[in-house]
Image (spheres, rainbow, N blue to C red):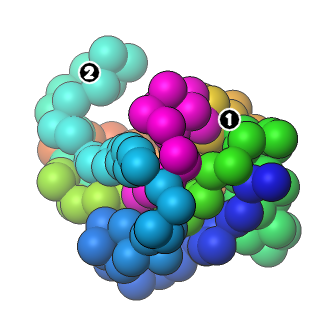
Amino acid sequence: MAVVVLAEVSAEPLDLAAHLAAVADPAMGAETTFVGRVRDHDPDAAREVAALEYSAHPDAPAALARIAVAAAGDTEARVAVSHRVGTLGVGDVAVVIAVASPHRATAFQVCRALIESIKTDLPVWKKQVEIDGTATWLGLGG
């Protein structure tokens, strides 16, 4: 049975090592990670991106836990996932996922399903700020 050991929405910088430590288990032979960073461009932006400002609905932590449970399903995976809120500059980490499982295929599958669901289902919004100060609000997910 899958276990979600960490599902957090935080204003503090995210720590990949802490997520890996959270899923560590001697029964697990595979660990996969995903780190989502703020990039300096976006296909919909007219200019270079300077920052992203993330805000979350108060239910976002509970929603993130539900999304993680659904992504892990009936696997034996251990999952740690966090999404950051606040103003993030280019290169800052916005999302961290660590998944451990007995076999690599499951770890990759759960990690992929989790980030895809976060992008569509997590009640987190972002304001994309371009270098000239132009800002655009983007919908659900990060």
Distance in Å between CA atoms under marks 1 and 2? 27 Å
10 Å neighbourhood of mark 1: few (<14), some, or many (≥20)? some
Say which quarter of the image contains residue 9. Answer: bottom right
Vertical side of 44 occupied by 59: above or below: below
Vertical side of 102 occupied by 9: above or below: below
Residue 77 percent across, percent down from the top left: 63, 50
Please indicate whether residue 15 sits to the left or right of residue 106 in the image.
left
Please indicate whether residue 71 sits to the left or right of residue 35 in the image.
right
Please indicate whether residue 128 sits to the left or right of residue 46 in the image.
right
Task: Name the residue at 53% across, 46% down.
Answer: 102
Labelled disc at residue 141: none
Residue at the bottom extreme?
12
What residue sits right under mark 1 in the picture? 117
Question: Disc 2 marks which amino acid?
Answer: Ala
Q: Nearer the viewer, residue 49 or 27?
A: 27
What residue sits right under mark 2 in the picture? 46
Q: Nearer the viewer, residue 7 or 44?
A: 7
Res. 34 in view:
yes
The answer to whether residue 109 is magenta is yes
Vertical side of 92 occupied by 102: above or below: above
10 Å neighbourhood of mark 2: few (<14), some, or many (≥20)? few
Quarter of the picture containing the N terminus is bottom right
Task: Name the residue at 74% across, 54% down.
Answer: 2
Question: Disc 1 marks which amino acid?
Answer: Ser
Range of the magenta residues? 96-112
Residue 18 percent across, percent down from the top left: 36, 78
The answer to whether residue 121 is magenta is no
Residue 57 percent across, percent down from the top left: 76, 65
Give the SS element for disc 2: loop
